[in-house]
Image: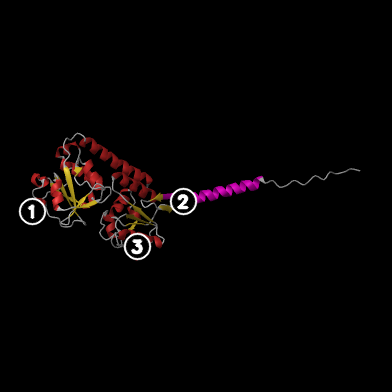
């Protein structure tokens, strides 16, 4: 009698199931990475995560619009603060109030997927927190040096998918500053400079400001030694500092400044006596942004006119002259 052996029936192979699980895990991993592809930490330590480059951006600080424009991303700006007029293309956009106290409802009405702000006074942080409570992604930056400004440009580039353009912008600015430093290195004189932020209640630019770096790159020395952005000082203190050059900014923070020749107590300053006092554009000097390099080149031409023939940009017009 023929006996047939009864071997156990073969179990189904587990290999296809393992492969399927592995493939599923890879798909989920790739999907997760795609959703969190853009991740930037702002200067308040908050991480902003975007699934794709921001398409609808509101910058509550004017210079951030200039950065977006320099990156070729102006078309993504959907609204502006009341006073912001550069680049010119944004003047026709809806206004959402002031940069310190934006109208939250007006901001939300534009359905932004990214809001940009510069750190500042208490009102600024209040509006930022209000927007965050409504689910708006807000990146807050701080710039008191060119290094910090370059970091902002790179992060704004990352958030808008313009990384390459951001690197080009930063390299261009670094190259111009390096060239300016090289020309300034051969100058013997380093005049003491005072930068007037506001008057007659006098405020000057301190060491923790972009203005201080502009002065340094232009071949001057900021005579205000306090490690602050803006220093409050009396006319007596200003007389003690004896600035050899005096810059008076005109703009939102200093709307109607008088020339030094119209201020009796300041007529004896070395800067007044030598005629080295000039009005300058606040938005170019005090506001951290791409035009800060223009300011450094312009100021170098004012402090060291002998360098104009070496490529330093002279003032474009006579607005800098300190006349009545």
Q: CA distance from mark 2 to mark 1?
A: 61 Å
Does the segment drawn in magenta span residue 16? yes
Disc number for residue 107: 3
Which residue is drawn at the image coordinates 43% and 50% (left, top)? 38
| Callouts 3 and 2 close, C-beta under 8 Å | no
Q: Foreground mark, 3 or 1?
A: 1
Which residue is drawn at the image coordinates 39% and 48% (left, top)? 158
Left or right placement of residue 323 versus residue 163 in this view? left
Q: Residue 78 placed where, x, y %?
A: 34, 58
The local crowd at label 2, few if under 14, some if 14 to 19, many if 20 or more residues have their Cα within 10 Å, is: some
Residue wearing tag 1: 264
Quarter of the picture containing the N terminus is: top right
Tell which circle, 2 or 1, labels the residue nearer the N-terminal end. Answer: 2
Instruction: Classify mark 3: helix, strand or loop.
Output: helix
Instruction: Classify mark 1: helix, strand or loop.
Output: helix
Tell which circle, 3 or 2, labels the residue nearer the N-terminal end. Answer: 2
Q: Which residues fall within the magenta stretch?
A: 15-39
Q: Foreground mark, 2 or 1?
A: 1
Choose top left, top right, bottom left or bottom right for residue 139: bottom left
Q: CA distance from mark 3 to mark 1?
A: 47 Å
Instruction: Classify mark 2: helix, strand or loop.
Output: loop
Q: Residue 125 placed where, x, y %?
A: 33, 58
Majority secondary structure of the magenta segment?
Answer: helix
**Front-most of residues 166 and 123:** 123
Tell which circle, 3 or 1, labels the residue nearer the N-terminal end. Answer: 3
């Amino acid at each position: 009698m023929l006996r047939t052996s009864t071997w156990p029936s073969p179990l189904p192979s587990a290999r296809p199931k393992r492969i399927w699980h592995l493939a599923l895990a890879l798909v989920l991993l790739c999907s997760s990475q795609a959703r969190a592809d853009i991740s930037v930490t702002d200067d308040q330590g908050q991480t902003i995560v975007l699934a794709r480059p921001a398409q609808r951006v509101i910058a509550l600080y004017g210079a951030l619009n200039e950065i977006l424009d320099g990156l070729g991303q102006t078309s993504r700006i959907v609204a502006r603060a009341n006073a912001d007029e550069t680049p010119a293309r944004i003047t026709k956009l809806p206004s959402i109030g002031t940069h310190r106290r934006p109208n939250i409802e007006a901001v939300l009405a534009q359905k932004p997927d990214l809001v940009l702000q510069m750190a500042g006074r208490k009102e600024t942080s209040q509006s930022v927190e209000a927007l965050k409570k409504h689910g708006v992604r807000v990146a807050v930056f701080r710039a008191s040096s060119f290094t910090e400004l370059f970091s902002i440009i790179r992060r704004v580039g990352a958030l808008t998918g313009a990384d390459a353009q951001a690197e080009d912008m930063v390299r261009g600015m670094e190259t111009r500053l390096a060239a300016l430093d090289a020309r300034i290195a051969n100058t013997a004189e380093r005049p003491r400079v005072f930068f007037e932020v506001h008057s007659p209640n006098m405020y000057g630019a301190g060491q923790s400001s972009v203005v201080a770096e502009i002065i340094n790159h232009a071949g001057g020395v900021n005579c205000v030694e306090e490690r602050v952005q803006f220093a409050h000082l009396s006319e007596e203190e200003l007389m003690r500092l004896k600035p050899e050059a005096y810059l008076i900014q005109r703009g939102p923070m200093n709307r109607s400044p008088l020339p030094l020749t119209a201020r009796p107590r300041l007529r004896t300053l070395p800067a007044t006596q030598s005629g080295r006092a000039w009005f300058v554009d606040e938005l170019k000097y005090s506001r951290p942004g791409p035009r800060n390099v223009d300011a450094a080149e312009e100021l170098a031409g004012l402090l060291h006119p002998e360098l104009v023939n070496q490529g330093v940009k002279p003032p474009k017009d006579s607005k800098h002259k300190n006349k009545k």
